[in-house]
Amino acid sequence: MLNYMPKGVCAKEISFDVVDNKVTSVSFVGGCNGNLQGVSKLLEGLTVEDAISKLEGITCGSRDTSCPDQFAQALKDLVVNK
């Protein structure tokens, strides 16, 4: 299990696994519970690259980032650029 501490969003932690380049077991601690549960389910089975391309750059309100954008950053930091 990989853990990431997002910055600039309501979620306090993102946990996930990557198996055979596919995202699995995504969970967010904190944030908008219902939305993040939905995002987690939609991410299951996506390739790392597809997840990054779909989520990177999404903003939340006046913030320059969002929980989905932070998940893309987690994938880049912990999987792609490890």
Image: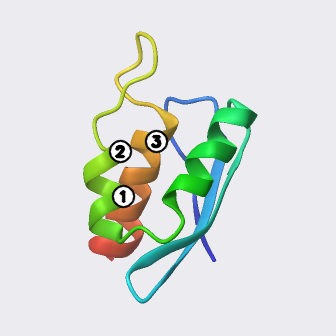
Whole-number angstrom distance, CA of label 2 to CA of label 1: 6 Å
Q: Which residue is mark 1?
A: 51
| 21 sits to left or right of 41 | left
Q: Nearer the viewer, residue 79 or 40?
A: 40
How far apart marks 2 and 3 lie (CA) works out to 5 Å
* Screen quadrant of the C terminus: bottom left
Q: Residues within 10 Å of mark 1 (few under 14, many from 20)?
A: many
Q: Which residue lies under the disc numbered 3? A: 68
**Which sits in the foreground, 7 or 65?**
65
Q: Amino acid at mark 3?
A: Pro
Is 60 displayed left or right of 3 in the figure?
A: left
For label 2, the SS is helix
**Residue for point 45% across, 12% down:** 61
Which quadrant holds residue 14?
bottom right
10 Å crowding of disc 3: few (<14), some (14-19), many (20+): many
For badge 1, the amino acid type reads Ala
Q: Which residue is mark 2?
A: 55
- Above/below status of 61 relative to 8: above
Look at 53% across and 54% down and name the residue there: 42
Of pointers 1 and 3, the one earlier in the residue sequence? 1
Residue 80: x percent and y percent?
Answer: 29, 72
| Residue 5 percent location from the top left of the image | 57, 51
